Amino acid sequence: KKAGHETDLIQIVKRYTHEEIVGLLKAVGEADIYAFHYLSHFRTAIISLSKIIRQLFPNTIVLCGGTSAVIEPETMIDLPEINAVCIGEGDYSMVHFVDQLGKSGLQNVIPNFWIKDKKGVVIKGDVSSLTTDINDLPFYDMCLFDLNNIRSMKLRIPCIPVIMSRGCPYS
């Protein structure tokens, strides 16, 4: 948002039927990009969701990032429904990615991203240096979160899981 781009968030907090997922996506509508935070235990769900997005919106870029995407980018970029994988920190790189998409499409190497072109060739950007001071990073846009939806998860303590550090917590 801060860079002038429109953003939205679909929070998936329970198991949805195929029809419910289609309804959620149609309510948001076609976007330039649908992006996922990929954790390996959600792999099957992300693949299913990516297939639905591809069927509904064939021209939308489907992107994934997150811990498991960094660890196994080949697994995700090889999926036909995935156009790009963020292989490093995405806080600033995502803005650069969206800016490039608006200017010239995804034809150039973009740091922290692997991008699959229309022929299926993967353009691999290098991982850029890490942000060393966490205070330099933008704070989460909490307006995107639907707190009532989170409350529907029926947790003992309603919360939004937020990682407040960088790197491996065990190092």
Image (cartoon, rainbow, N blue to C red):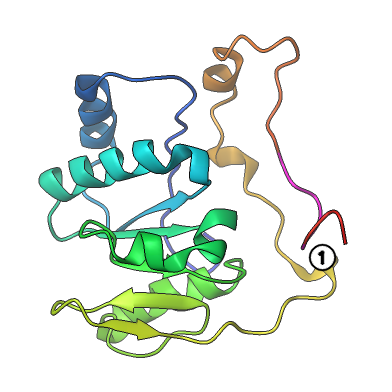
Work out whether residue 56 or residue 48 is closer to the camera in this orientation and state it.
Answer: 48
Is label 1 in a helix, a strand or a loop?
helix
Count of numbered circles in the view? 1
What segment carries the magenta color?
Answer: 162-167
Residue at the image position 58 percent from the left and 21 percent from the top? 150
Q: Is residue 3 visible?
A: yes
On screen, 10 above or below 34?
Answer: above
Residue 28 location (% of width, % of height): 29, 38
Give neighbour class at mark 1: few <14, some 14-19, many 20+ (Cα, 10 Å): few
Is 56 on the left-hand or right-hand side of 171? left
Quadrant of the rendered image containing residue 14: top left
Residue 108 location (% of width, % of height): 34, 90
Q: Is residue 66 visible?
A: no
Tell whether position 166 is magenta.
yes
Is 137 on the left-hand or right-hand side of 39? right
Q: Which corner quadrant holds the C terminus?
A: bottom right
Mark 1 lies on residue: 134
Is 106 on the left-hand or right-hand side of 146? left
Q: Amino acid at mark 1?
A: Ile
Residue at the image position 40 percent from the left and 68 percent from the top? 74
Residue at the image position 61 percent from the left and 9 percent from the top? 154
Q: Considering the whole magenta stretch, tell me its main secondary structure.
A: loop
Is 38 on the left-hand or right-hand side of 45? right
